[in-house]
Amino acid sequence: MVTAPTDAQAAVEMASAVETARITATLIRVTGDWSLAEDCVQDAFARALVDWPVRGIPRNTGAWLTTVAKNRAIDRMRSAASEKRAVRELAILTELEELPDGSGGNPGADDDRLRLIYTCCHPALPLDARVALTLRTVAGLTTGEIARAFLVSEATMSKRLVRARAKIRNAGIPYRVPPPELISERTAGILAVLYLMFNEGYSATGGATLIREPLVREAIRLTRLLIGLLGGSPHEPEALALLALMLFHHARRGTRTDAAGDLVTLEEQDRGSWDRAAIGEAMALLAAAEHMGISRRSRPGSYRIQAAIAACHMTAPDAGGTDFAKVALLYDHLGQIAPSPVIELNRAVAVAMSQGPEAGLALIDRLEQTRSLDGYYLLPAAKADLLRRLGRRTEAYREYCRARELAPSEVERRYLGKRLAETGPGSSS
Amino acid sequence: MEYMLFICTDPTAPAYVAAEDNIVEWGAEMEARRVTRHGNRLRPVEDATTVTVRGGEVMVSDGPFAETKEWIAGYDIIACADLDEAIEVASKHPMARFGKIEIRPVWPLGE
């Protein structure tokens, strides 16, 4: 039987998304060798790409891939064992040979994948390495794909991954799901890594959007995977809320820039083009997180509050119809559990929208006096918007100038440039 | 696994409070758990001497080899199951609060 190459390729891609973490995790547990496990899994997918179009897609793709990866690992261990005549390698070989091939039917598979995620996100690894290792080992992206997503060379990314694996081995980072006294902090660490991965992809604008899409996609997929594995745990509500938050942001992906690649603010985005299905799923996830939080008496964490804020924006019929009083209140809660001047700035903007520009401006002035946001372009930008709405055009112009000087990228500078032209001398608006 | 804890001073840490120094309890707990192998305080950097041999000539100089605001005030060699246990042991040491502790895995020769 010959399968159309495109079908076979789609089957390999699908299997890669579903099976990589499970097979890699099991091979790491048995062999203790991260690079060997990753190489063998990659070899198995490479074989599938050659084999499936010719011989057809196997009925159980997971079992097929497990067998190929396992046999590859057995070959490698066997040659290592004969070189060293090592007892340890022989013991590993025996265990490898006894591994079950079936996917899904292996009751230890969930534990293996969780172990892998917790180890990749261990706080003793540098943050960028945690993200890269999770993408490589859990998501199964190639080193080249990860390098392109982070806009670094493949050699740089490869070095980062080699360093991370070496540290796991040399520093004795345990390959396990952490014990109860550590699990809360470590699970929060995983959510932080996934959110960072998402933002890394999401904050890219203009021409960079395409190449960073894998980060967004993988972050969402891995969060789904984690939720599946965390079922019943006290961390489930925060993980659900994080997924809701990602989907709310992701629902706006097509409307954040215009045809020319210029930034379109939330108020000006075409709400009709937002992804309704994603918003619907995010609302359901947030409701589930809130319901679960109430029944388990867990206080809302930062993702639950951030998702609730996003929900206010995403469900309003238009920008003016947003419940800004609720948004301001939610930012107040968020500031209490995770104090930050950026949250205070967002609260000030929400207060301005619900109580009027003067009230917001007073909060921003107070924040400016603390100097904690010196150099952050969104402070003068927010101030300028409020001054403009109050008709204080000269001051607004000055603040837009300041914001443009501080803006980090060309897209933002162009946006602020447009606003400058509107408030500048000779303009009519 | 064996780790070395470098017990360091940290100018940004809260001031030392003798009443909150639990080093005796820490030592007793870690000895009972058979974690600690060997450890001590170190005399301050004023008492340090640095030795180099260049071209067969021994050179001796006063002071530490690196002038920093942070310096090593003590050390402990510990044996732990893994890094998580080493982190737990270090986090209970009083100098984790009054200074900082660097955990380094011991690298046996030939490995």
Image: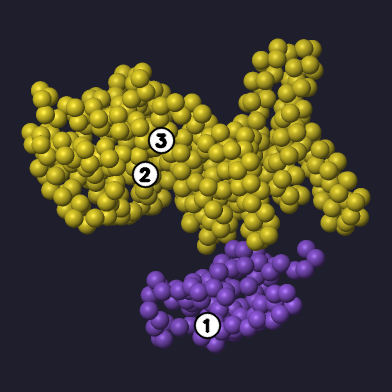
Sequence-first disc among 3 and 2? 3
Residue A59 in sight: no
Q: How is the image coloured?
A: by chain
Alpha carbons under labels 2 and 1: distance apart: 50 Å
Q: Give the image quarter of residue B47.
A: bottom right
Q: Which residue is mark 2?
A: A304
| Numbered disc in front, either 3 or 2 | 3
Q: Is residue A40 left or right of residue B100?
A: right
Chain B display color? purple
- Chain letter of the residue carrying label 3: A
Estimate the x, y position of residue A1 in percent, counting from the top left: 79, 12
Estimate the x, y position of residue A289 in percent, counting from the top left: 40, 41
Query: Which quadrant would the C terminus of chain A be assigned to in this image?
Result: top left
Towards the viewer: A291 or A123: A123
- Give the residue type at disc 2: Arg
Q: Give the image quarter of residue B37.
A: bottom right
* Helix, strand or loop at mark 3: loop
Chain coloured yellow here: A
What numbered label is drawn on residue A74? none
- Give the residue type at disc 3: Ser
Q: Which residue is mark 3?
A: A203
Alpha carbons under labels 1 and 3: distance apart: 48 Å
Q: Which residue is mark 1?
A: B45
* Helix, strand or loop at mark 1: helix
- Chain letter of the residue carrying label 1: B
- Is the residue marked by circle 3 packed among few (<14), some (14-19), or many (20+) residues within 10 Å? few
Q: Relative to A428, does residue A350 appear above or below in the rendering?
A: below
